[in-house]
Image (tube, helix red, strand yellow):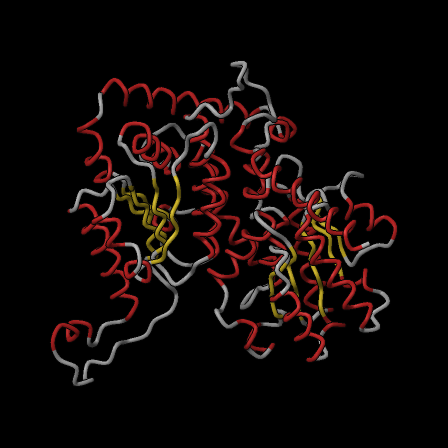
Amino acid sequence: MPEQHVPLRLDETRALDLLTPRVSPAHLQEIDARVAASLAAFRAEQEQGYSGLQRSLRAWTQSHLREDDIRATVELAERVRARFDVFVLVGIGGSDLGGRTLHDTLDHPFHNQLPREDRGGAPEIYFTGDTFDPKRLVALTDLLEARGLLDRTCFDVVSKSGKTGETVSAAMVARDRMMRAGIADWPSHVIATTGFDSESVLYQMNARAPFFGVLPVPNGVGGRFSFASPVGLLPFAVAAVGSSPEARVREALKGYAWAHVRGLEPAGESNLAARLARWWHVAERLGGCTELVFCNYADDSRLGDWFVQLYEESLQERGEGLNVLSTRGPTGNHSILNGILRGPRDKCVLVVEWEDLGTSATIPADTGIEGELESFGGLGMESVQRASCHATVDDYLANGVPTATLTCRARDGACLFALMRVLMDAVALKGRLQGLHVGEDDTVTPGRDLTYLQHGVEGYKVRTRQNAEEMRAQSA
């Protein structure tokens, strides 16, 4: 990617300037040495081959190189577009948020309301399966049946184990609705994105009655690191407008590849992930910060949801890790900005700025409105959005709030994929700085890095199943 088309820039200098006067140079040197050692370990790991990356749960770093998976995803997307009018992703957590984020950030905000020709032949796109609350699931299936679209709907059920309670329950409700609507061949309306082994219930079901398609959740790729695998690429390819599914995927993966190369470079100006991780670590360990405000300065909310899961589920272990607050600018300025400036001084802020929002609208200059708002007249709203972003950052810094800006060149696939990959690399490195790869017995064992595990979520799953069994017994 030519240097003039570099998708991202980072400015954390002023944020560090607010923190480092309180920090011992020896402590900074220690952090820098650990950053350098971790990056060297990541480079060595890449040279050991894909199987080693799978064992260490870091196969996601090479998602852009998995040609078989990419081709299978694009081919299935083409088949979906030719056969169906509606595509529904059924998933929760990382099986859901990656695809939702790509759709929310890059596609038309009223995609489903557009005529199909204006959608470039793409089907309507919906997401469900992320809750036991039936409100939206029932409303969706009611709507599809009333519009005569249930027989033209494809359900992509995403679960590596095929045992995720919320997801499988929603999928079974959807199956029941299809069967009651007279759709006897319901498997031909289903895609399973799952583990390719006998432990996956979905994989077993496909063996008995083949689905419309099956895609892998690759080994060594955790849900919150899976957006560039078939998990997120399929809905992204299905929703392509203005290009083919393959062209859309290939162009976006250029950004992922760019970030992959940069994230393996020695610590320095070009390694944005290393700079981010270092800043987070200084803020948390040495700067007294307990909360990281993630402010996506755009009218897109899902990127923040995705980042909250990525950061907190990966790094909040052993009683450590920043709490992440997700907000949007300037929307969030009218809800939490006052608290950031006037509340507890325990926050650092990461602002994501978009240089080119991809849409423009000019504020009329002859409205007759006088006073302070006259300054907006004749300007593009995107220009005022940028002015608002810079004003917010400057105001935070002037008030002593450590604030960094991650600037994206454009709101497009390549830049978004680069952004999300940089954030994943930064989280991975922060996990190393926290020592999450080292076990309680002081050993480093592949597959046991807490950055990629989430043992804390198992308790609610077990108790939910126990409660459900008790309810069934009582109703028997």
Q: Nearer the viewer, residue 72 or 153?
A: 153
- Residue furthest to the left: 371
User: Where is residue 58 shown, x and y percent of the image?
Assistant: 57, 33
On-image quarter of the C terminus: bottom right
When the figure is inspected, residue 319 is found, relative to residue 257, above or below; the finding is: above
Q: Is residue 399 above or below residue 100?
A: above
Going 43% across and 42% down the picture, which residue do you hit?
Answer: 423
Q: Nearer the viewer, residue 304 or 254?
A: 304
How many numbered marks are there? 0
| Pick the front one: 195 or 349 | 349
Left or right for 433, reference 154:
left
Q: Residue at x 50, y 36 (%)?
A: 314
Q: Residue at x 61, y 46 (%)?
A: 229
Q: Position of residue 337 (x, y in %)?
A: 26, 54
In the figure, is residue 250 to the left or right of 350?
right
In the image, is residue 202 above or below residue 121? above
- Residue 397 rendering spot, x and y as whole percentages: 19, 45
Query: Relative to residue 442, is residue 394 drawn left or right?
Result: left
Within the image, what quadrant is residue 264 found in?
A: top left
Q: Is residue 336 left or right of residue 475?
A: left
Q: Residue at x 34, y 52 (%)?
A: 295
Q: Position of residue 347 (x, y in %)?
A: 29, 42
Q: Nearer the viewer, residue 251 or 113?
A: 113
268, above or below 302, in the image: above
Outermost residue toward the front in this view: 474
